[in-house]
Each structure stands twice: as C-alpha cells, then as structure tokens.
Amino acid sequence: MKHSSNRSRLGRTAIAAALVAAATAGSWYANDAHAGELDINIAYKGASQRAVWQKVLDEFKAAHPDIDVKVAFVEEEAYKVQLPSWLTTVSPDIVNWHDGERMAYYAKRGLFDDLSGQWNKDGWDGMYASTKEASSYKGKQYAAPTFYYSWGLFYRKDLFQKAGIASEPKTWPEFLDACKKLKAAGITPIAVAGRDAWTLAGWFDYLDLRLNGNAFHQKLMAGEVPYTDPRVKKVYTTWKQLLDDHDFIDNSLSYDLDSAQPFLFQGKAAMMLMGTFISAGFPADVKPKMGYFQFPIIDPNVPTAEDGPVESLHIPAHAKHKAEAQAFLAFTETPKISAELAYGMGSLPANSQSTEPEDPISKVGFQILSNTKGGIAQFYDRDMTKEMADEGMKGMQQFVADPTKLDDVLAQLEQARKRIYKK
C-alpha cells in the first residue's frame, strides 16, 4: 500500500510540475515569442527632436501592441562615434542615419540590409522617387528616407523691389542682372558665411550641379574625376566671376553663419544661399520680408538637380528582429507619419504624397525637391569621404581668399585626391 501511494504521490507531483511548466511556457510565449521585439537606436539633437520621435514611437506601439519596443535615444555626436561598433557587434533592429555616401559606406561593408524588396512591395518607388538614387548603392536600396530640407536662395523681397528687380531670377543671365541692379542701388547682392567652410560648399555644389549635372557631380564626389578636369575648372571660373564682380560681402571668410545672417536682417545684403532649416530663426519683423527661390538654371540642357540632404532609417544586417523592423519601416514611410516627423523636425517630408507644409518658404522647398528630375545630392560633405571633403572645403576658402590662385588650389586638390583615393 505504502509503495503504491508513493507512486501515486509521485505521479501527482509530476503532473503538477508539468502543469506549472506548461503554464510557465504559456506565459513566456504570451510575453515574448508571439509578441515580438524591436530594438531601436535614435540619434537626436535637443529635447524637441527627441519628443517628435517619441510621439511617432508611441503611435507605432498603439498600432502594434503585440510588439515590445525598446528605444535608446543617443545625442547625435555620441551616436556617430558609437554606430560603427553597434553595426559590427550586437546590432539594434533599426538605426537612423543619412543617405548618400554615409549610407553607402555601411552598405558596401555589408552592414545594412538590402531593402529593395520592401521598396517594391510597399510602393516606395513612387512615393520616394526623388530620394531613391540617394537611398541606393549599386542599384539596390539600403535606406528608408524620412525627411530632408531644401537648399536655395533666400532673399529680401523689399530690397529686390527697391533695386527694380521685377521677379525672382530663373536663369543665370537674370541672376547676374539682379546682382548688377542691387549694386547700383547700393546693396551688396550676396551674404556668405565663409568662415563656416560648408557654406562655401553649397556654392560649389550648385554651380557643379547646374553646369555639369548630378551624374558628373557624384563621380567627382566619389574621387573618380581629376580636379584638373576642365569641367571642374569651369565651376570655379563661374564662381570667380561673382567674386571679381564683388557680388559677395567683403571679408566673407571672417563671418560664420550666425554673424552673416544679420547682413540680410539689416538690409545690407539681399540674398543668401542656404538650407531652409535657417528660416525658423528669422526675427519676427524680418520673416514677412523674406522670399526663397530655386538656384537659377545655367545650362537648360543639364537636368535640374538639387541639394536635399536626406535623413533615413536602416535595418542593420545583424538585426535580430527583422520582421518587426520591416513593420516599423512600413509604418514610418506612410505619407501621414513622414509628414509628422518632418514638420516636427522643421524639415520636409521625403514622401511626395505627404501634405504640403503651411510655411511659405518650406512650401517652395517642398515643391523644388518633389519636382526635381535630375536627382537629389546629399550635400558636399555627405556625398564624399570626410578626408577629401575637408581638403576640398579648405581649398574653397583658399580660392575665395585669392581667386587668382585657382590653378594652384586645383593642383593641390588633385594631389589630395590621388593620395586619398590611391589613384
């Protein structure tokens, strides 16, 4: 009797243990396996940007309550330093980054997933046509674009009127004529913040895009074209004409962006080539006087391309939860969420089906970028390796300081290209 009761007690214990194990397994599945997980690392600048991302993440969680979302917010400068080690070791499932050369750097090394299938499946080819090239490496897409900003010429509408300029210049002869009229009225045509070398790079980009087109520009950015090439020299000689004609403020190399903008605000200069991100900082009394137009066409036979630096999302190659990561991209790439992110960031939605912005300057920028046929460049120091970009911008400052040294500057840049790209 004792033996059999022991056996039955053991049996009951085994059944109870099995039930506990089953219950534990059931709760594990409920909390983890069927739920899914998503680890996201987000770079941000300032509390307002973090809040915009948090709102989008909260909306995603509400739409996908079965996915356990964990997010790490990392300040942008620290993020840049940490990203390479994340991508090569334990990767998050989603990272935000930049299109163009900065994306290609990781795609080339097999550290970003190929998203071409999702581009086709989710209809991004249409919605993101203008940023597809910047999101591609060797014909495949490795980025999901989120938002970008336009570059163009800000101008004082009242000063144009005072100088007798009837409309925004659309061609190069019209632009040169406007400069002449402004000088005759005692107004410096263009403010530029040459101490911040990247502001000069904006001039180089636009003159090259308008004279030689985006395909040539990207080859130059990739180190495939000598700086002694006549097409590169033509960019600088066109620029030199503006310098020789005193179309820029004097001593432009002594001003950074903050100290150059007051030339516009105080009515001492009429125009500035810059990204739309500066418009948020215009003084209230100046904002109604400001207009914004597309960089003029120089050669009508060259397809019109623009600078529109694109922010993007990526799935790292070593991500553990790829299905959930794809669900997050599908959510953020919709016209509604693209617009929400962009306007929260003071930028433009990369999605051409998003609602147009309310702000008049952003509206012009949105139209310029949505309608471009010649492609969108990422900006000089985002389209090029950092070392060559630094050399190039230093050369631009030397050129602006003394335009007669143009040939020396180009020879120096060519030596740098050969060294950096091992040509």
Image (cartoon, grey):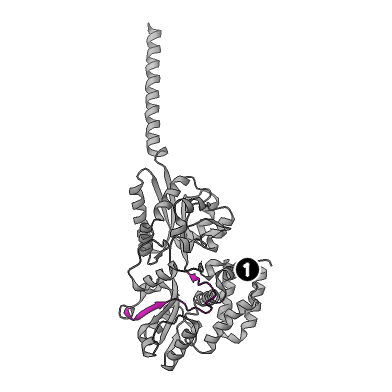
Residue identified by numbered label 1: 223
- Count of marks placed on residues: 1
Instruction: Give the residue displayed 45% in from the left and 45% down from the top.
Output: 323
Query: Is residue 266 covered in magenta?
Result: no
Q: What segment is highlighted magenta in the picture? A: 288-307
Where's the N terminus, which quadrant?
top left
The local secondary structure at tag 1 comes to: loop
* Residue 335, percent from left and from top: 38, 58
**Of residues 31 and 247, the one drawn nearer to the viewer in this rendering:** 247
Residue 149, above or below 180: above
Instruction: Give the residue displayed 40% in from the left and 38% down from the top.
Output: 34
SS majority, magenta: loop
Answer with left or right where residue 392 lies relative to residue 55: right
Q: Amino acid at mark 1?
A: Gly
Answer with left or right where residue 257 lies relative to residue 405: left
Query: Is residue 297 covered in magenta?
Result: yes
Residue 167, above or below 361: below
Q: Residue furthest front?
A: 301
- Count neighbours of disc 1 (C-alpha within 10 A) and say few if under 14, some if 14 to 19, many if 20 or more: some
* Residue 421, percent from left and from top: 65, 66
Instruction: Give the residue displayed 43% in from the left and 91% down from the top.
Output: 181
Residue 348, above or below 155: above
- Asked whether residue 145 is in view, the answer is no
* Residue 12, percent from left and from top: 37, 17
Res. 36 image quadrant: top left
Res. 365 image quadrant: bottom left
**Of residues 267 and 63, the one drawn nearer to the viewer in this rendering:** 63
